[in-house]
Image (spheres, grey):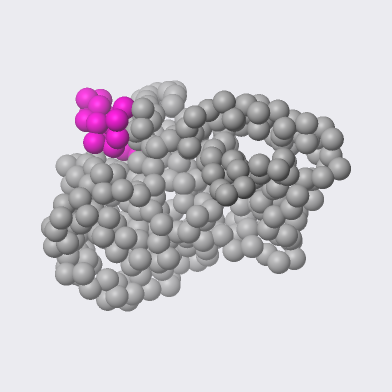
Amino acid sequence: MDINKSKIRDLSFSDLILTDENRFFLRYLSGSTSPIIEIINNKALLEEITELKYKLTVSKEKEFLFLWDNIPFRVTKIITIKGEHFFLRRPFYPVPDLVNLGYLENQLVKLKSLCGKSGLVLFSGATGSGKTTSMYSLMTDLVKKNGDIVISIEDPPEIPVESIYGNEGHGLWYQIDAQMVGGYEKAMISAMRYNPKFIMMGEIRSADAANQAVRAAVNGHLVLTTIHGSSIQGAILALQQIAAAGMQSQDLARAIISDGLTGVIHQCLVRDKITGKRTMKSSSLFIDGDDGIKTKIRNGKLELLSTDIYNQNIASRVNSSTYV
């Protein structure tokens, strides 16, 4: 366990929690079997975190990207009955290689073959399941190897990746903060001016975001996004319900999603009780023009997808790796 290190950047953890009482906690610290531990008796580290907290109080935003010692954090400001707290999620940065995340071999083949396709790819799971890391890793792989233009629309951006990729056949990646341009609809209008091949969107939490993602997918773009869901079917249902709220029609939402959905990956991180390491477990469903799968989605018979999911995953050889 590396709690005795004197710099934040030298620690490996998923979240840093700063309370109103100036007590500081780390979540999922490498080498610790406890999910949350308090930072005590480390003067240098406590002083750095105190300075960091002071810097965060300047922002009036509730959610924002903050760089500290060249490390990106997604900061969420939480107001409780006791005061103002900060929840800092630390992404994997630099973005890890897709092959090192722990996907099944057939999943990697499918994911890497998406460069020539259009449609919507959902990464689903609970909070802290690594879905955002997976999405960034896949998009990085696609733009490095295939070039062209990527536009990511997030609220807020989580990892600073805007850059030029590749030595030949360059890929250009641009990041748009949806909140700064007036929402997902305006951000998507702006993005379309670039005529992007790939689009990446932050977590779908609103009808606006869901509708923009689905419409871009059916209009010929490859769109990657994340959504909360307890299973593959749960992720599709969540997307249908959120999109229907904007379209005001469950049937229309199902029809458009059945036409636009290309794949769904559901994942979780399982923590070893002895070592504290977290290993990814995943399942996936790729539509690949399968009319049977599309019909089940269009008719809302998501429970019938269980056989398709089983058949696509059972023959795969597990290729697991650890996150922390």
The image quarter containing residue 180 is top left
Q: Position of residue 250 (x, y in %)?
A: 17, 62
Asked whether residue 288 is in view, the answer is no
Above or below 270: residue 216: above
Above or below 283: residue 25: above
Above or below 147: residue 4: below
Residue occupying the point 44% across, 34% down: 157
Q: How many marks?
A: 0
Q: Nearer the viewer, residue 299 or 281?
A: 299
Q: Position of residue 59 (x, y in %)?
A: 53, 28
Q: Nearer the viewer, residue 4 or 61?
A: 61
Above or below 53: residue 220: below
Residue occupying the point 35% across, 61% down: 235
The image quarter containing residue 202 is top left
The magenta stretch spans residue 198: yes
* Numbered range of the magenta stretch: 181-200
